[in-house]
Amino acid sequence: MTVSSYSWALMVIHYLQFILNKLKITPSILFQKYTPKFNNILSYLGGVTPPVLPCLHGLVPEKFNSDNENHSMDVQEEVASIKHFKSDNIMCLGELLVGFFQYYSLFNYNQYAVSVRAGCRLPVDECRYTKAPKNDPHQWKYLCIEEPFDFTNTARSVFDMDVFKHIRNVITCSYQELARSKLLKNVLPINLDISQS
């Protein structure tokens, strides 16, 4: 009962692509109304603004259509609509990392699922009852991450509430420690002995 590396990768992609405009809320409106808490509100409502990654399912639906039976794809192929994509995001890697943990520490897991396919959060019930051959409504429990091609929950192994609470607690504690200390070693203690290399 753990979160797979694939699920973590989808969470990262979702965070880097999810933008406020999907919710029809602009940063300028939030800034005018909530200036003191602007960054917290942005992280709660969306991932990064502007996005670091595009939503490929939205930009190139003919390539990323889940109805398409041809599941082979040339990953070296240049796709014209994304060939010249350049993010306007200027956040450094450290800011993005802290933002990732902040976003998921505030994420409403009871109501929403992570969706890379849609490039936004989706209501869990919408994912739960999506008609798809492999989708089972019972697999949508506590941590819900939509698999972008077969619509299943990639985090279905997290079916125990105590395990979910532990995962969420680790995310929240990681955010709090990174925001406080700005030291990666405090949340990822790796001791590399480089003297033997």
Image (spheres, rainbow, N blue to C red):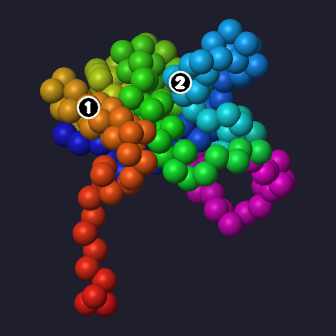
Q: Residue at x 33, y 32 (%)?
A: 172
Residues packed near mark 2 inside 10 Å, few (<14), some (14 to 19) or many (20 plus): some
- Residue 42's x, y, as percent? 59, 24
SS at mark 1? helix
- Is 11 or 58 nearer to us in this picture? 11
> Is residue 80 something one can see in this rendering?
yes
Which SS type dominates the magenta stretch? loop
User: Disc 1 residue type?
Assistant: Asn
- Residue 175: image quadrant is top left
- Residue 71's x, y, as percent? 57, 51
Vertical order, 34 against 135 (above or below):
above
- Residue 192's x, y, as percent? 28, 74
Q: Quadrant of the C terminus?
A: bottom left
Is residue 76 magenta-colored? yes
Residues packed near mark 1 inside 10 Å, few (<14), some (14 to 19) or many (20 plus): few
Q: Residue at x 47, y 30 (%)?
A: 103
Alpha carbon distance from label 2 to label 1: 18 Å
User: Disc 2 residue type?
Assistant: Asn
**Mark 2 or mark 1, earlier in chain:** 2
Which label sits on residue 169? 1
- Residue 160's x, y, as percent? 17, 27
Q: Is residue 2 left or right of residue 10?
A: left
Which label sits on residue 40? 2
> Is residue 25 something one can see in this rendering?
no
Q: Residue at x 29, y 31 (%)?
A: 168
SS at mark 2? helix
Residues drawn in magenta: 69-87
Which label sits on residue 21? none
